[in-house]
Image: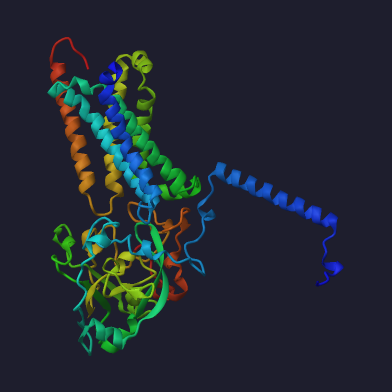
Amino acid sequence: MRWLRAHWLEILFNLAALLPLGLLVWDFARGQLTANPIQAVQLRTGRDALVLLVITLAITPLVRFFRLGCLLPLRRLAGLYAFGYASLHLVNFVGVDYGFNFGAIFADVGDKRYVLAGLAGYLLLLPLAVTSTHGWVKRLGRNWERLHWFIYPAALLAVVHFFWQTKADFRQPIIFGVLVIFLLAARLISLSRRLKQPGRGI
Amino acid sequence: MQKIKSSEITPKSLFLTRRDFIAGLGAVAAGAAFLSACQGGSLSSLPPASEPNDKLTTKRDITSYNNFYEFSLSKDDVAEAARNFKTSPWTVAVGGLVANPRTYAIEDLLKQFPPEERVYRLRCVEAWSMVIPWLGFPMAKLLQAAQPTTDAKYVRFETLNDPVEMPGQADTSFDWPYAEGLRLDEAMNDLVLLSNGLYGETLLPQNGAPLRLVVPWKYGFKSIKSIVKIELVAEMPVSFWMAAVPEEYGFYANVNPDVPHPRWSQATERRIGEYQRRQTVLFNGYGEEVAYLYQGMDLKKFF
């Protein structure tokens, strides 16, 4: 009971983060993933990864500006879920869409710069997911925080990836782009303030 | 009981070797599958998009997955958004550089040019495709009745312009109404249909009711929907997508695996209802019927 009281927010967050996956499976089971289910899975997992990335980025500013320290344990969770949905996104592309036919993937990818942007973003997230454990935080010390700044270029690449694959309706990529840039700016402002205080580093 | 001739009975030794042979085949197939999985296969191992007896796409998929920005930017929302679209009364004005301009009521048009069934592949520029049993009549018949003058070089088509009936037209980032064009000799090709139905039934709004163009060797966006105006002109018309994104969409828009969209490949496609991709085929597999139209043209330049 005490455990529940201490962790209710994390439990709630886990459930919320798993909800899109549950809905995806449910819609698949009902045959409700449009006439092009592979593309629907691709669009939905990509969107979910991006939403979770933005949530991850929003937690530190929320903690700083609104003193919502209770949110801090959610940051790693959100980041890991973002990575999880991005992984589903990648696996669906390579394994389901192209059936692991690497010849066809390479023939196609040269003409698809959005794939390269997405892949670059994913590769930036990979070391962050690996070093998300307490052990790695301790081992890397101050470098851990430096390494995890990679989440910003990763999120920007994800937005560029979204932009480049959009045919005409740019509303969603624009919203995500504005959010990521706003959150990056918020971080940079608070960082420069901290740097102005004597005796403190990043 | 019918007697089996002894010559038809397989000797036991042969029977056994055949069994070995089949088992061997299985092993080879498994090995090949394993190898191809390791090596990752190749583009040429995918089946081509055009086959003699293409399986029809289901009516449900054809009527629920639509690109029709006049109703919604989301393909699976178009059917619902277009449900109450009014297609009667409807007229189609045929004019411009013709000897016989005429405005047809849709009923008269279909009476004068009785529709027939034609099964065509439809390849979307977004790299998915369908096989659709259209009802329609050849565009050439309408053009013959209109009698283009010698100055007429192109045909220009226009969709209804009515932001009340078509709420998507309120989006001012596009240049409405939707317009498309064909060279006159392209429009005269026997493959080009003016369609009023599919699967033997009247066209539903999401598929371009009451009258739409079908040009099976070009990307789907050339096949303009809900047509109200057909005009013979001297100059090359500017289509909706040419106006919207000039560097990405040309006038011809012929299906061509070797000419990628600036931001994505056109080498492969997904046939709706299938899981494995297919190789896209030049002119969507209708080269025999249409290649003569582009003789000597650089298709990379005239994309």
Q: Which quadrant, please, contains the C terminus of chain B?
A: bottom left
Extreme residue toward the right, this view: B6
A86 and A142: which is toward the camera: A86
| Foreground residue among B282 and B127 | B127
Q: Residue at x 20, y 48 (%)?
A: A171
Residue A61 left/right relative to A162: left
Residue A111 appears in view: no
Q: Position of residue B262 (x, y in %)?
A: 33, 54
Q: Is residue A54 visible?
A: yes
Q: How many marks?
A: 0
* Residue B169: % across, % down: 16, 62
- Which residue of the protein is positioned furthest toward the top in this rendering? A199
Residue B144 placement (x, y as % from top left): 31, 87
Q: How is the image coloured?
A: rainbow
Res A161 quadrant in image: top left
Vertical placement of residue A116 versus A36, above or below:
above
Looking at the rendering, in which quadrant would you find the N terminus of chain B?
Answer: bottom right
Vertical placement of residue B26 versus B95, above or below: above
Foreground pick, B245 / B151: B245
What residue sits 14% from the left and 65% below the top? B163
Against B166, residue A62 (above or below) is: above
Q: Position of residue B183 (x, y in %)?
A: 31, 75
- Which of the 4 quarters of the picture holds residue A146? top left
Q: Is residue A177 left or right of residue A197?
A: right
Residue drawn at x 31%, y 32% as measured from the top left: A15
